[in-house]
Image (cartoon, rainbow, N blue to C red):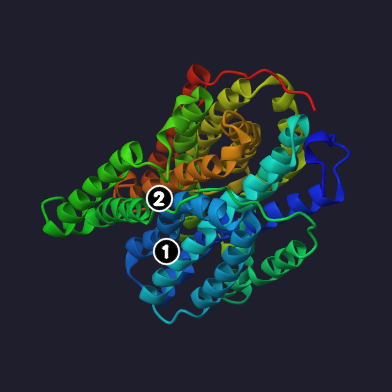
């Protein structure tokens, strides 16, 4: 059996290395699929039609089940064991990826994306919980830094991979790529010597899961379809009302049920509460920026899918080079300054992209903003994760990571649903500028929230 608590960050055991790679790759496929689709949206629209609504649903169908079920997935992980649940998630994700790739209609594609999000919900909480229970002290901060660098990099490299497939084969192959890393991770799971971890008395709250899914689904449906029908239509206000009522009932149930799916007492930890508020603002901005940039560069600026994907490649390079180091620095200096300066730098990067004009030039109008954005993102993600999970006892790391990941996915879900309203119904130059302004405002707010709310914990030694 490994001795993770005593391992130094530069002397990880074989078991720890395997655990870290399992966590990275399992989360990687979930994050990759959340963004690889962005650059494929114009091609999907060409195949299936349906306007911006089809594009929004292609993204939000995945985020809807991912965001609403990731909470119950934490309980599933505690009930059945983290390693077993990761295995289930990987198999389900592989099967649904193939279904997406073979979809004959937009309806089938969106349905498969819903199921894919459900499988993805099983992966991230268990992956992070494995890290939290196998590493301690500075080693934990460094491991989280490596995990966030690689998985957040997946959110950026996704459009590059998607673009290559769109231009040189088909957008459908962008989803089949998941099969290889899934197979590798399933093999790595067989190399572990540790026994699976279950929590005595763990309980799956199906009623809460249904209320959360119905609540988010009703509200998101209304936000996406409102530009087509208007708030006065029963097709909009009725789902919205049902969604709000269900979500309120979900929150109420968490306060009164004996074993809640989302324990509200987690939010009594200051860094957990304020960190999740910052997460909502920052990740909402990230989703908005990723969608708008990938679509605008193709549909309005005239770039190929590959070029549109490569446009954000500098962010990937910056994160790969610096994320682990930032994780180590945050472990020594505390997360507050990073969680403040990072989002503000990202906001500056978004504002720099207001230079985009009808006479488009990537090198002068987009690249400077991309570089600043990448530096800010690198400074943000690892300290943010460490601050939030470090505020909660490791015995509750599964549900804590599930809540934080649910917040980030729900933030993206809401941001994508509001795109039609933000850009004025059409993603032209004016709509692009408006989206960058909203992105910057969300990010700046995230930095301010972190400065006001986050406190540096006492530094823990190995």
**Position of residue 435 in the picture relative to residue 241 (left or right):** right
Identify the residue shown where x is 39% and y is 46%.
415
From what the image shows, is residue 456 above or below residue 51? above
Res. 325 image quadrant: top right
Mark 1, Cα crowd under 10 Å, few <14 / some 14-19 / many 20+, is: many
Identify the residue shown where x is 49% and y is 74%.
100
Q: Position of residue 4 (x, y in %)?
A: 79, 40
Q: Mark yes or no: residue 357 visible.
A: no
Pick whichever, 54 or 327, lies toward us.
327
Q: Position of residue 296 (x, y in %)?
A: 46, 54
Res. 172 image quadrant: bottom right
Identify the residue shown where x is 46% and y is 28%.
273
Task: Quickly name the residue at label 1.
Answer: 58
| Residue furthest to the front | 201
**Position of residue 162 in the picture relative to residue 351 (left or right):** right
Q: Which circle marks residue 20 in the picture?
A: none
Sequence-wise, the earlier of marks 1 and 2 is 1
Instruction: Look at the image and tell me in which quarter the C terminus lies.
Output: top right
| Residue furthest to the right | 11
From what the image shows, is residue 298 above or below residue 347? below
From what the image shows, is residue 452 above or below residue 363? above
Q: Which circle marks residue 413 in the picture?
A: 2
Q: Position of residue 311 (x, y in %)?
A: 61, 51
Q: Secondary structure at mark 2?
A: helix
**Position of residue 70 in the picture relative to residue 6 (left or right):** left
Pick whichever, 201 or 210, lies toward us.
201
Q: Mark yes or no: residue 69 visible.
A: yes
Pick whichever, 194 or 446, lies toward us.
194
**Position of residue 250 in the picture relative to residue 366 (left or right):** left
């Amino acid at each position: 059996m490994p001795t993770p608590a005593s391992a130094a960050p530069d002397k990880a055991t074989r078991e720890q290395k395997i655990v870290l790679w399992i966590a990275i790759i399992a989360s990687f496929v979930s994050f990759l699929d959340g963004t690889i689709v962005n650059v494929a949206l114009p091609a999907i629209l060409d195949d299936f039609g349906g306007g911006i609504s089809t594009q929004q649903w292609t993204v939000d169908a995945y985020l809807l089940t991912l965001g609403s079920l990731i909470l119950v997935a934490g309980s599933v992980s505690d009930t059945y064991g983290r390693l077993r649940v990761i295995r289930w998630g990987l198999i389900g994700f592989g099967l649904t990826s193939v279904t997406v790739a073979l979809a004959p209609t937009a309806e089938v594609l969106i349905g498969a994306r819903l199921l894919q999000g459900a499988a993805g919900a099983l992966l991230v909480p268990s992956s992070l919980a494995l890290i939290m229970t196998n590493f301690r002290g500075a080693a934990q901060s460094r491991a989280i830094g490596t995990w966030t660098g690689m998985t957040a990099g997946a959110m950026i490299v996704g459009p590059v991979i998607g673009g290559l497939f769109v231009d040189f084969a088909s957008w459908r192959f962008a989803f089949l790529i998941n099969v290889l890393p899934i197979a590798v991770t399933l093999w790595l799971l067989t190399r572990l010597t540790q026994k699976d971890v279950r929590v005595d008395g763990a309980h799956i709250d199906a009623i809460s899961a249904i209320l959360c899914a119905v609540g988010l689904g009703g509200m998101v449906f209304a936000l996406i379809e409102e530009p087509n029908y208007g708030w006065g239509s029963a097709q909009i206000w009725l789902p919205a009302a049902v969604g709000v009522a269900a979500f309120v009932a979900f929150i109420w149930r968490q306060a009164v049920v004996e074993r809640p799916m989302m324990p509200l007492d987690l939010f009594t930890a200051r860094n957990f509460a304020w960190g999740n508020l910052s997460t909502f603002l920052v990740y909402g901005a990230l989703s908005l920026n990723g969608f708008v940039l990938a679509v605008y560069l193709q549909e309005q600026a005239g770039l190929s899918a590959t070029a549109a994907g490569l446009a954000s490649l500098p962010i990937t390079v910056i994160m790969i080079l610096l994320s682990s180091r930032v994780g180590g620095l945050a472990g020594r200096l505390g997360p507050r300054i990073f969680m403040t300066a990072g989002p503000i730098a990202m906001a500056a990067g978004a504002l720099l992209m207001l230079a985009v004009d009808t006479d488009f030039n990537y090198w002068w109008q987009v690249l400077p903003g991309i570089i600043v954005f990448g530096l800010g993102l690198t400074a943000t993600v690892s300290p943010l994760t460490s601050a939030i999970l470090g505020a909660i006892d490791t015995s509750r790391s599964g549900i804590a990571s599930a809540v934080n990941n649910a917040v980030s996915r729900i933030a993206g879900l809401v941001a994508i649903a509001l795109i039609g309203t933000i850009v004025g119904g059409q993603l032209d130059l004016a709509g692009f500028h408006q989206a960058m302004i909203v992105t910057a405002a969300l990010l700046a707010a995230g930095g301010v929230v972190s400065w006001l709310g986050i406190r540096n914990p006492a530094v823990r030694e190995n």
